[in-house]
Image (cartoon, rainbow, N blue to C red):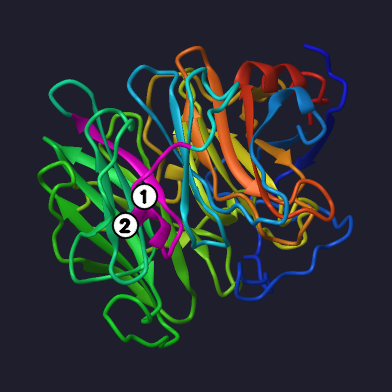
Amino acid sequence: MALRRFFLIVTMMAAACAPAVGLAARTEQPATRPGGAAVAPGASTPAANTATLVRLDLDGDAARQTVVDKEAGVYLGHVSTVLVDDGKTILAAYPKGHGKGPIVLKRSEDGGRTWSARLPVPDSWATSLETPTLFRVGRSEHCESLILFSGLYPIRAARSADGGRTWSDLAPIGDFGGIVAMGGLAATGDGKFAAFFHDDGRFFAKGGKAAGTFTLYQTDTADRGATWSSPRAIWSGSDIHLCEPGVVASPDGATIALLLRENRRVKNSHIMFSTDKAATWSAPVELPAPLTGDRHIAAYANDGRLVVTFRCMAKDDPWKGDWVAWVGTWDEIARRAPSAAAPERDGVAAKPAGANGALRPYLVRLKDNLTAWDCAYAGLESLADGTLVTTTYGTWNAGEQPSILSVRFTLAELDALAEVAPSP
């Protein structure tokens, strides 16, 4: 494919770096965009080989971009998507408003190339108080079973037993609430799932108040989402504010990781691990700067590499506040696990850089967001043909309210772009 409209730079990642400090909060404290600052170096463990981070900018490639929805004067917000079991139909849900408001549902039947009009939904969806999230929870007798969550107090859910064509009303899943519910969902076997959310004291119980402490919660189901357990805290702290847990499992399914936003902006993003199907969790540890941001959503490409999309919030990064994707391997994030070394696995590693064979992860700017921070709660789907389809909101045009955009790319295309980068 032509290489026009792309900007590529290569920056060396240091073997170790200081944690990021001074980042601004998401919606609570709007940030100021840095102007042309040098990229903050990424951290790696002392045992890791020094690697090259390849930066690829897809912002100007309009051919990859599809406008999913926009409405003059109306804020269209935080997106969640789900790929149903035909492998090409994607559902997208998002609110009319910043993190709350009536839920809009759209469908693409061609892998994100085109999108339906707004679909009919139950009247109760207009009462949503939070960002909706969509997940697959197995199959009913004839079709895919899906669940949609809406947070704050109480957390509510709607269900579909026909691949998202019809839906139930929103109904409480228990006498508890939380923020960005559910941030992630992990399959733990035999129709069981663990779901994750956070709270700052305001919404876990009715009439709550902010206490300066963030808590990560886990709730479990043994019946594919029909009923949910009382939540249990898996981490709590006030020195850092970890939240919005995004789930990624190791390629063999033996380890589950939670990718975590740090909302006090005094540290990088963090990660926690479980090796016993979410029964216990390791203490959180920092991620490197290139994975520092908000609302991490992960998927594996069909060559085995890992793609994570999020809002870039690394200190002094020129793409801070923009919609980005990191491309690397599970092994790179597994180096943060309590076990000293990353596990060996079969499959395709990140593309080698130079004769020394060091890994070359990519940081890809998917779209330049024209505000300082308000974008990139994204859906991310991996199609069988190797295409990655990611969909989110942001301010893409000056003077307009946020709208919904979908971007398609393959890792083969990124690899071709990276080939022009000089070896270190």
Q: At which x and y percent is residue 159?
A: 25, 43
Crowding at dot 2, Cα within 10 Å, few <14 / some 14-19 / many 20+, comes out as: many
Tell me if residue 124 is in the magenta stretch.
yes
- Dividing the picture into quadrants, the one containing residue 374 is bottom right
Q: Is residue 284 left or right of residue 174?
A: right
Between 120 and 381, the one lying in front of the other is 120
Q: Residue at horizontal 52%, vertical 17%?
A: 110
Q: Residue at horizontal 69%, vertical 49%?
A: 14
> Disc 2 to disc 1, how far (Cα)?
5 Å
**Quadrant in which the C terminus appears:** top right
Point out which mark residue 159 bears: none
Q: At which x and y percent is residue 357?
A: 63, 24
Say if 394 sits above or below 174 in the image. Answer: above
**Quadrant in which the N terminus appears:** top right
Disc 1 is placed on an element classified as strand
Q: Amino acid at mark 1?
A: Gly
Crowding at dot 1, Cα within 10 Å, few <14 / some 14-19 / many 20+, comes out as: many
Point out which mark residue 196 bears: 2
Q: Amino acid at mark 2?
A: Phe
- Dividing the picture into quadrants, the one containing residue 264 is bottom right
Residue wearing tag 1: 184
Q: Residue at horizontal 60%, vertical 39%?
A: 326
Query: Are discs 2 and 1 less than 8 Å apart at CB?
Result: yes
Query: Which range is magenta?
Result: 119-139
Between 105 and 6, the one lying in front of the other is 105
Q: Earlier in the sequence, mark 2 or mark 1?
A: 1
Say if 64 sits above or below 237 in the image. Answer: above
Q: Is residue 184 left or right of residue 61?
A: left
